[in-house]
């Protein structure tokens, strides 16, 4: 299927060929693009991290299992939201999946409509998260263009200091400070002081999507254990 | 009424011989019974002056002549001696001799009442007294053996006529009416088996060894099973030992029934243990069906005119439903309660069927299956379900054993091959940790299990199933680690 980098793709990994076929048809029938893989390795070899979409993952597969992939997605820097599907929904596996940041845990045979709903939801989350990431990256690039002095000024501004105290702290005149502030606004493409603060604070916040948080948590847990 | 002494002599049951006291070696009169005893006609005996004494065994001659000479009037003496018969061999005779006057006023003569002594006939003519005693003992032993023998003995000629019949003590043939002697075997055998019985007789007479055949015969309500063993006695007589196998067969049938029941119960319990995996196996087609069907609905709603795609999706639904149906049928076949029956089966197919049942479990435990099924394997006569049960049992044991080794080392090898000239072999091997000696020693005994939830009957029943097929099951250590199970089945059990 021909997809551009911006079209979301539903990636299905299931070792049952007919389940893959069926899910591809189901997804395609609601106008979404789908790509199927019979094992984790094929998917890893194929996936480009800038490709938006979501992942539909079977828990048990020969070779690397779905749950193992889920727990290690951060290592591959893959932040796609994941919907886990399984032939036997035992409690420990579902707990493990949710802990590792799965968006949903569906038992086969599942209600196809709820799978489609979940897929749409996941794609929306992914899009939002990607736009946040994009904003963050833009900001990072813009911040990189600031001079050391301008960075000092920005940090002081973010600390909520008054112009007077900033000028005194940095030992510069109010006039020089105004020049720095104007340059900063130009470089960060904002028109007002309020806009500047909003942009910087929003983009530097922790990602707020549940699966990404979950994955961060599982990484922290794993690192902590190691 | 016989009126003369001659007539009396002729109808007497024993052979009578009359000789003169002065020359006892000259026979004056002999009754025709001599022919039965020795094969001579009376005329032959009378034609030579010293016919009798000439044919006496050299070792017995002096004793006999002395006894005749010493015989006092009115006394009896019983002599045992050997005389050369018409075919040149010695026959043991019992000769009760006495001096009698045959007619009023006549001369006294020597009258001998001759009978053969079959219990002495075994002696070849030159027997030493010691050897004779030995032979007598051996003969008595044989006699006792025959008395005690539960089987019937028949001597049958090439045409199938029963020449002699000796009823065994446990053989219902003894009470057959009419008695079997002088009858044709066709009167005992079912018509369908007469031909093959005559063939067997001919084969044994032609020098083939070890003829055995089984037959049934009904008397009233009861049906009997017999096993007949044939051995040639001479050029046209066959000795047949007939054993009553009715009770034996009944016991075997009962045992077989019990085993079949047990096998069935075990299949049910196996199914219970495999339920999760089987549900998984059914989930795949069901998931596919609902997804294909939903996709089809979406397509038709969005593009009601694009029938092609909808038809294609509906076809997929049908295919998957058929697949699910096959899973269910396979299960039903496996646990169906039914009479065991032999049919011509391909071992490879049975292996595939067993693999189909365990597919989900194999997949879930991450086991890699290496199949090596010899194409064109000859068919074997076997009970399908029972053999599938054995194969499934071996596969499940292997999968269980593989849980003990890391994921990447879990390999299951399934191989079939033609073991020339007359059997096929299945090898199920795993790359697991192998069997300890104490486990291996008791592997096929019931209630020996290494699994906490196992009954310990799987391999025991497998063994009895394979042995009921006249096959063999055994284990070996796999080169490179792990265990091998071998099953060998004869092409014709």
Image (tube, coloured by chain):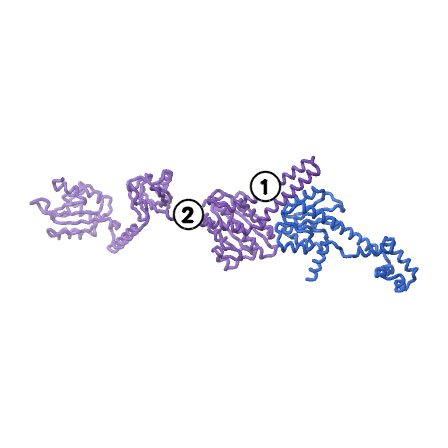
The residue pinned by badge 1 equals: B322
Mark 2 on the same chain as mark 1:
yes
Q: Residues within 10 Å of mark 2 (few under 14, many from 20)?
A: few
* Chain A: colour as depicted: blue
Mark in front: 2 vs 1: 1
* Chain B: colour as depicted: purple
Task: Return the residue nearer the eye: B223 or A200.
Answer: A200
Q: Where residue A66 sits: x, y (%)?
A: 66, 52
Q: Is residue A223 left or right of residue B412?
A: right
Q: Where residue B155 sits: x, y (%)?
A: 31, 44
The residue pinned by badge 2 equals: B253
Nearest to N terminus: mark 2 or mark 1 = 2
Task: Return the residue nearer the eye: B323 or B149.
Answer: B323
Q: Where residue A191 sits: x, y (%)?
A: 87, 53
Residue A134 in view, yes or no: yes
Q: How many marks?
A: 2
Mark 1, chain letter? B
């Amino acid at each position: 299927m021909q997809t551009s980098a911006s079209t979301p793709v539903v990636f299905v990994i299931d070792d049952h060929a007919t389940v893959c076929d069926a899910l591809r048809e189901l997804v395609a029938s609601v106008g979404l693009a789908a790509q199927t893989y019979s094992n984790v390795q094929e998917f890893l070899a194929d996936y480009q991290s800038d490709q938006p979409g979501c992942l539909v993952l079977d828990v048990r597969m020969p070779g690397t299992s779905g749950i193992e992939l889920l727990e290690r997605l951060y290592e591959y820097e893959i932040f796609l939201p994941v919907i886990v599907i399984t032939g036997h929904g035992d409690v420990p596996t579902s707990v493990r999946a949710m802990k590792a940041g799965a968006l949903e845990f569906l038992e086969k045979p599942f209600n196809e409509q709820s799978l489609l709903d979940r897929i749409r939801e996941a794609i929306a989350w992914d899009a939002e998260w990607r736009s946040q990431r994009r904003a963050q990256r833009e900001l990072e690039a813009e911040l990189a263009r600031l001079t050391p002095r301008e960075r000092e000024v920005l940090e002081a501004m973010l600390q909520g200091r008054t112009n007077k105290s900033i000028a005194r702290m940095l030992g510069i005149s109010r006039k020089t400070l105004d020049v720095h502030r104007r340059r900063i606004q130009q470089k960060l493409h904002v028109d007002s002081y309020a806009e500047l603060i909003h942009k910087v604070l929003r983009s530097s916040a922790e990602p707020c999507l549940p699966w990404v948080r979950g994955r961060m948590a599982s990484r922290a847990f794993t690192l902590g254990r190691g | 009424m016989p009126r003369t002494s001659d007539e009396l002599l002729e109808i007497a049951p024993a052979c009578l011989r009359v000789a003169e006291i002065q020359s006892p070696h000259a026979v004056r009169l002999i009754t025709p019974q001599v022919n039965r005893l020795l094969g001579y006609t009376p005329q032959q005996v009378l034609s030579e002056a010293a016919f009798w004494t000439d044919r006496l065994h050299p070792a017995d001659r002096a004793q006999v002549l002395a006894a005749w000479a010493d015989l006092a009037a009115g006394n009896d003496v019983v002599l045992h001696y050997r005389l050369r018969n018409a075919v040149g061999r010695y026959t043991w005779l019992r000769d009760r001799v006495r001096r009698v006057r045959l007619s009023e006023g006549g001369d006294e003569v020597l009258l001998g009442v001759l009978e053969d002594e079959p219990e002495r006939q075994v002696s070849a003519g030159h027997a030493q007294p010691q050897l004779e005693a030995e032979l007598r003992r051996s003969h008595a032993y044989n006699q006792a053996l025959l008395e005690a023998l539960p089987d019937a003995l028949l001597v049958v000629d090439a045409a199938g006529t029963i020449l002699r019949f000796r009823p065994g003590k446990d053989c219902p043939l003894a009470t057959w009416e009419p008695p079997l002697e002088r009858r044709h075997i066709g009167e005992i055998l079912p018509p369908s088996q007469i031909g093959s019985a005559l063939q067997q007789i001919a084969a044994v007479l032609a020098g083939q060894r070890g003829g055995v055949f089984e037959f049934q015969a009904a008397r009233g309500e009861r049906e009997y099973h017999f096993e007949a063993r044939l051995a040639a006695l001479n050029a046209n007589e066959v000795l047949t030992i007939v054993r009553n196998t009715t009770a034996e067969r009944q016991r075997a049938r009962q045992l077989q029934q019990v085993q079949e029941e047990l096998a069935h119960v075990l299949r049910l319990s196996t199914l219970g243990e495999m339920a999760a995996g089987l549900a998984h196996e059914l989930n795949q087609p069901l998931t596919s069906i609902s997804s294909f069907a939903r996709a089809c609905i979406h397509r038709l709603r969005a593009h009601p005119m694009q029938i092609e795609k909808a038809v294609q999706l509906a076809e997929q639904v049908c295919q998957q439903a058929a697949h699910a149906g096959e899973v269910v049928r396979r299960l039903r076949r496996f646990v169906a309660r039914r009479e065991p029956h032999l049919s011509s089966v391909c071992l490879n197919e049975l292996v595939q069927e067993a693999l189909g049942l365990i597919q989900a479990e194999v997949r879930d435990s991450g086991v890699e299956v290496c199949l090596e099924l010899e194409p064109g394997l000859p068919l074997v006569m076997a009970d399908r379900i029972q053999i599938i049960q054995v194969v499934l049992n071996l596969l499940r044991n292997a999968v269980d054993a593989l849980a003990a080794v890391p994921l990447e080392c879990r390999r299951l090898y399934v191989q079939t091959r033609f073991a020339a000239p007359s059997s096929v072999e299945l090898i199920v091997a795993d790359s697991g940790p192998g069997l300890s000696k104490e486990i291996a020693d008791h592997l096929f005994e019931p209630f020996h299990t290494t699994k906490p939830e196992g009954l310990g009957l799987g391999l025991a029943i497998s063994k009895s199933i394979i042995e009921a097929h006249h096959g063999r099951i055994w284990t070996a250590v796999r080169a490179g680690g792990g265990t091998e199970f071998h099953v060998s089945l004869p092409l014709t059990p």
